Amino acid sequence: MAYLKASDISIDFPLYHTENRSLKKALLGQVSSRFGVDKKSRPVVQALRDVSFSLKTGDRLGLVGSNGSGKTTLLRTLSGIYQPTAGTLSMEGKLISLLDPQQGMNMELTGYENIRLRSYYLGLSKSESQMFEEDVVGFTELNEFLDIPVRNYSSGMIVRLAFGMATAFSPEILLMDEWILAGDAAFMAKAKKRVEGMVQHADILVLASHSPSILAEWTNRLIWLDGGRIVADGPAMEVFESYLPSQDFQQLLKTRP
Ligand SMILES: Nc1ncnc2c1ncn2[C@@H]1O[C@H](COP(=O)(O)OP(=O)(O)OP(=O)(O)O)[C@@H](O)[C@H]1O
């Protein structure tokens, strides 16, 4: 059974080049400032503050909030890229993160070479590698483009390949940032089917996005972040009702499948 538990997570980013006393004073003197100081009195941005939640098998969590509210920082913390400044994170289950389309991809190699390289890193047997390649090739529909270096791909084509490789094996915990939305409509329909397949296998999804319609479709729970803190956590439509301007919420209700 997969689970993920964040307890009072805080993340501070050190601010370099703020030795200038008046700048430091200006940053720290603002009301409701995100700026603070660490234990050694060095200026920091307080990217996340006391974030706590737990997820269990079947939970599809969306992260909403304005620019700079902490969504990407939270995803990166859950994926292990950032170490919390305070608090603890515990989880059980194989985790895959789709946070950066070029993550783990060699831009100088062709699509096929990248697929084979990934098989190698995953430690797959010969028959598993073959199945992996067939699955990714079929999913991406990149056809002859798989024979040319990835640096010649469009951003949507890179998304197809990255998403195809990362989701060929069902992870138990899947973390996604909204770059996945760079795909075209036909790709989105396929990607959604693939994610739904994974979630149906009782996995955990965490998705950060600015798109209410995508979140309403893909998630069943929302966390609303503001200034690095959780301001609401609950069923997706309930949180949307408080988060969205009422006109946008009414529109979302109308367009829901
Ligand atoms: N590497 C970093 N160094 C310093 N500060 C950072 C770093 N990454 C993020 N921050 C700060 O942390 C805060 C949260 O940023 P984050 O990127 O997590 O927000 P977000 O909700 O994903 O925003 P957006 O919707 O614009 O993508 C911001 O104030 C940002 O300036």
Image (cartoon, grey):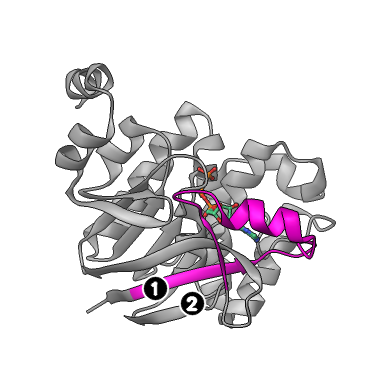
Q: Which mark is residue 84?
A: 2
Label 1 sits on a secondary structure element that is strand
> Is residue 29 located in the magenta-colored stretch of the structure?
yes
Would you place residue 222 above or below residue 244 in this image? below
Quadrant housing residue 117: bottom right
What range of the chain is rendered magenta? 8-37
Name the residue located 28 percent from the left edge and 24 percent from the top edge: 245
Name the residue located 29 percent from the left edge and 64 percent from the top edge: 204
**Residue reaching furthest right?**
108
Estimate the x, y position of residue 54 in percent, counting from the top left.
24, 70
Disc 2 marks a residue whose amino acid type is Pro
Quick one: label 2, few (<14), some, or many (20+) residues within 10 Å?
some
Residue occupied by mark 1? 9
Work out which quarter of the rendered image holds the C terminus and state it: top left
Q: Which mark is residue 129?
A: none
**Circles 1 and 2: CB atoms closer than 8 Å:** yes
Mark closest to the chain's N terminus, 1 or 2: 1
Name the residue located 39 percent from the left edge and 43 percent from the top edge: 65
Estimate the x, y position of residue 240 in percent, counting from the top left.
23, 36
